[in-house]
Amino acid sequence: MRVKVLGSAAGGGAPQWNCGCPNCVKLRGSASKARTQTQLALSPSEGVWFLAGASPDLRQQLTRDPDFAPRSSRGTPIEAVILSSADVDSVLGLLHLREFQHFRIYATAGVQRALTEENSLFRTLARSQPPVEWHDLPLEREIEISQSGAAAKLTCKAVSVNGKFPDYMSDALRSALPPKEAVVALEFAQSGKRLLFAPSFPWLSPELKIQIAQADVAFLDGTFWTDDELLHFRGSGPSAREMGHLPLSGPGGLVDQLKDLTKARRILIHLNNTNPVLDESSGPAHALRDPGYDVAYDGMEVAL
């Protein structure tokens, strides 16, 4: 399996267009270190790609990489998109794929309802002939997402991470949907190798710890370094946990809780523009090297 990090930042990218924090100031002077919003692409075989999520920056991410160029006068090597949530940062890119193009979308039943019942914009995906196909992504059950009979079988399993449905939804719809379907981690498997994509979780559940322990490569929520990061930079704002993200540092943080897990290669993704690990010379960036974490960047590739 070939894996590409098309984007590695949290919502707004880094630098964020309206932010003057120290990180963004430095990044504006160094385009090579800038990051677009989180997007993963997986290829189980030559010329076939699957997208984990649909970033708002998806169009530019695809057009700058020749692996995603059409193979004929019109078409795409992208077979399917697998969604981990209905958050804007995870789904807005679907609208970039609306150009009368057939593909498949996998999502929990709750995420599908969030996108199709109250968001008429996503009806544009039905204009292709045949229209885009929506497929259920069940919890805790491995399903094959590669086309039947494919030489390189690729499976996916969704694991609930106890997140929340986005606040753009009506209270009525949000209360009608199963909370466990709101945000999931995605485990992809091929030929005995496992990759975990978990860019957002408020705490480490026993189930998620098991998935991390079993993975060969785990892309994990690296949004914030501290729980009060936004308060420090802005003077106000919710905590990391209140926003649905387990901070990296401190007692009970991600690094602390995973200190005994050694199998998986752990790669931090979905990095907020305020996170000090974006500055490779910072103390937090150096502190991550001893526990053995990698920090994702746009263009990073991993082979399993």
Image (cartoon, helix red, strand yellow):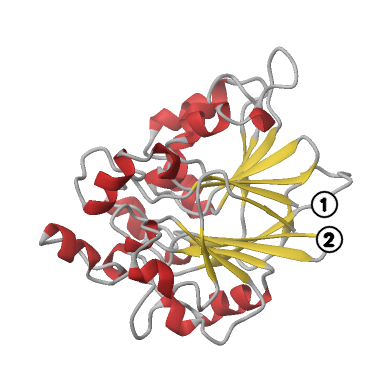
- Extreme-front residue of the structure: 281
Tell me the element at label 2. Answer: loop
Tell me the element at label 1. Answer: loop
Circle 1 sits on which residue?
A: 153
Q: Is residue 103 above or below residue 225?
A: above
The answer to the question of whether label 2 and label 1 lie on touching residues, with beta carbons closer than 8 A, is yes
Circle 2 sits on which residue?
A: 191
Q: Which of the two discs, 2 and 1, labels the residue nearer the N terminus?
A: 1
Residue 238 rendering spot, x and y as whole percentages? 20, 64
Residue at 37% from the left image edge and 39% from the top image edge: 118
Visible in this render: residue 116? no
Q: CA distance from mark 2 to mark 1?
A: 8 Å
Q: Amino acid at mark 2?
A: Ser
- Extreme-left residue of the structure: 235
Residue at 43% from the left image edge and 41% from the top image edge: 36
Residue 95 rendering spot, x and y as whole percentages? 47, 30
Q: Quadrant of residue 277?
A: bottom left
Residue 56 rendering spot, x and y as whole percentages? 42, 37
